[in-house]
Image (tube, rainbow, N blue to C red):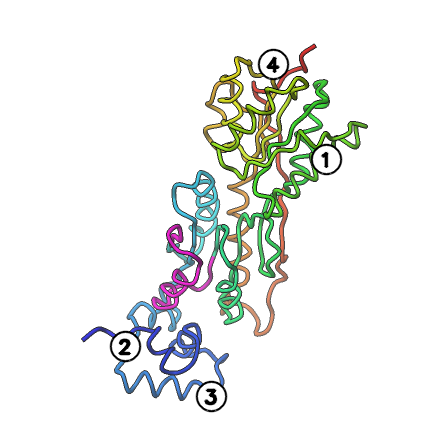
Amino acid sequence: MERITIRDIARISGVSKSTVSLVINNSPKVDPETRRRVLRVISKHNYVPSVAASALAKGKSPFIGMIVPGLTWRMVAPMNYGVASVVETTPYEIILYTSTNDHDYASVIDRMLTSGLSAGVLVIAQDQPMDPLLDLHAQGVPVVLINTLGSSVDLPSVEADSYEGARTAIRHLLDLGHRRIASLQGPMKYRCCQDRQRGYEDALAEAGVTADPAFTVPSDFDPVLARERTRELLDRADRPTAVFAHNDSTAYAVMEAADDRGLRIPDDLSLVGFDDIPSSAHVRPALTTVAQPFVEMGRHAARMLLAAIPSTERTAGEDPPAPIRIGLETTLVVRASTGPAPG
């Protein structure tokens, strides 16, 4: 006979899986009638919670859950390092979950609730519905987002300041004498890309340069599309002398398109990216880019989460104030892909 799961208990009881988890862990947040109903179902079906979950309920084996969008994402490693550098100084350990193949976070959260091990959850956000995370937070499990893509979800979060990063990048190009500067956009449904575009436009306006609408080009972070759109830009009689790419991966596509057209970077075309992923220091020419502080983002998020987890050392009802949203400064890293505007 197939083993009954926490999902089955929730369905039979007519409650959420997180409510069943709270009952199992003897949380006072469940009303008495609901608790009795869930316990009756557990008893009737001989459901046995995991030993690990029971240990956690008794204050043992504390874990931090961390949901990441696949370990192949280039920014995951430095964020993980930042988180680990903080968590490893505490009694907590990290359990890593990946959500690459899930349509949303719900199935990952199901696995977390089934194990009952996570005292709090860190999430490197991606393009998925936030409702499961909001529900988890509402059930009393602390949740902190890292690299939110600029989403406005009402959860504590840590992200980089995309607006100022873009503004600084464009000022650098303007200082080099560039006036025909193109913007190769990412997905404009993300607020971070909206902020980067706004920083681009505001920096031009502050310098008295009118932004040419033809120089704002959507690419959706798709290297193939970015390469095609850049070729179209470079075929113009009034082609741009510089390109600002909304991330480093599309900046690499610009390099390929420039090479296709026989143009040299930075002699004929200057290029700035955004992110400063590790490979950007090693492409040729090395990419000038806006560095996001991925390690510090991980550290800040870990500290926020630890502060939100109830502690036996804290006075009852006394929680340290935690900022809802932290925006960290970016840094322009000037390398070989930018130079003076061609005469």
Distance of label 1 from label 4 (alpha carbons): 23 Å
Q: Which residue is mark 1?
A: 201
Q: Which residue corresponds to mark 2?
A: 48
Vertical side of 319 occupied by 218: above or below: above
140 within the magenta span: no
Above or below: residue 291 compared with residue 142? above
Residue at left offset 40%, top offset 69%: 59
From mark 2 to mark 4, how far is it between C-alphas? 68 Å
Q: What is the C-alpha distance between the residues marked 1 and 2?
A: 59 Å
Quick check: marks 3 and 4 in contact, CB under 8 Å?
no
Which residues make up the magenta segment?
97-121
Tell me: 233 left or right of 55. Answer: right
Element marked by disc 4: loop
The image quadrant of residue 202 is top right
Reading the image, the residue beneath label 3 is 32
Amino acid residing under circle 1: Glu
Looking at the rendered structure, the kind of residue marked 2 is Val
Q: Earlier in the sequence, mark 3 or mark 2?
A: 3
The answer to which quarter of the image holds residue 156 is bottom right
Query: Residue at the location (36% across, 67% down)?
Result: 60
